[in-house]
Amino acid sequence: MELLFPLLILALLVPMFLGIRRQKKEMQKTADLQDSLKIGDRVMTTAGLHATVAGLDEGTVDLEIAPGVITTWSRMVVREHVIDEDDATEAETVDNEDETPDDTQRRLNGE
């Protein structure tokens, strides 16, 4: 009975610790992405806006959302790089040249 309380505390603290660690890793990955932005990169904001980076300042980024339409946003809103379909297709073609049909099926099934 005396071991029940420490085990309960441990069972509650371990998942909390792992969750905080995962959150820190995601925040660091997002910060690295925002620091690595270059003019011409295709990005998606936290609001789901797809745009091209047209200019960079220390805390802001100018995004071209349509030809000739440039808006200024905080760097914090950039969530991810968007890979064009042409680039993704070329990368898959090069990576999958030696892939067997079984390998393809496993990849598509997420194995």
Image (cartoon, rainbow, N blue to C red):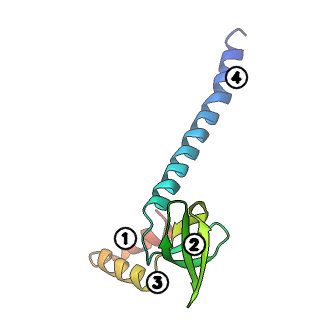
Residue 85, labelled with which disc? Answer: 3
Please state which amino acid type lies under the numbered disc 4.
Answer: Leu
Please state which amino acid type lies under the numbered disc 1.
Answer: Asp
Q: Which residue is mark 2?
A: 44
Q: Residue at x 50, y 60 (%)?
A: 58
Camera-side residue of 39 and 103: 39
Seen in the image, is 29 located left or right of residue 97? right
Q: Helix, strand, or loop for circle 2?
A: strand
Using the image, determine if residue 6 lies above or below residue 38. above
Seen in the image, is 10 located left or right of residue 80? right
Q: Earlier in the sequence, mark 1 or mark 4?
A: 4
Q: Quadrant of residue 11?
A: top right
Q: Badge 4: how crowded within 10 Å, few (<14), some, or many (20+)?
A: few
Using the image, determine if residue 110 lies above or below residue 52. above
The image position of residue 94, as x and y in percent, is: 30, 78
The image position of residue 91, as x and y in percent, is: 35, 77
Q: Which residue is mark 4?
A: 8
Structural distance between the alpha carbons of marks 1 and 4: 44 Å
Q: Residue at x 63, y 76 (%)?
A: 49
Q: Which residue is mark 1?
A: 103
Q: Helix, strand, or loop for circle 1?
A: helix
In this rendering, which labeled residue sits more in front, label 3 or label 2?
2
Structural distance between the alpha carbons of marks 4 and 2: 42 Å
Q: Badge 1: how crowded within 10 Å, few (<14), some, or many (20+)?
A: few
Q: Residue at x 46, y 81 (%)?
A: 84
Q: Earlier in the sequence, mark 4 or mark 2?
A: 4
Q: Residue at x 60, y 39 (%)?
A: 20
The image position of residue 83, as x and y in percent, is: 46, 76
* Residue furthest out toward the left: 98
Q: Earlier in the sequence, mark 3 or mark 2?
A: 2
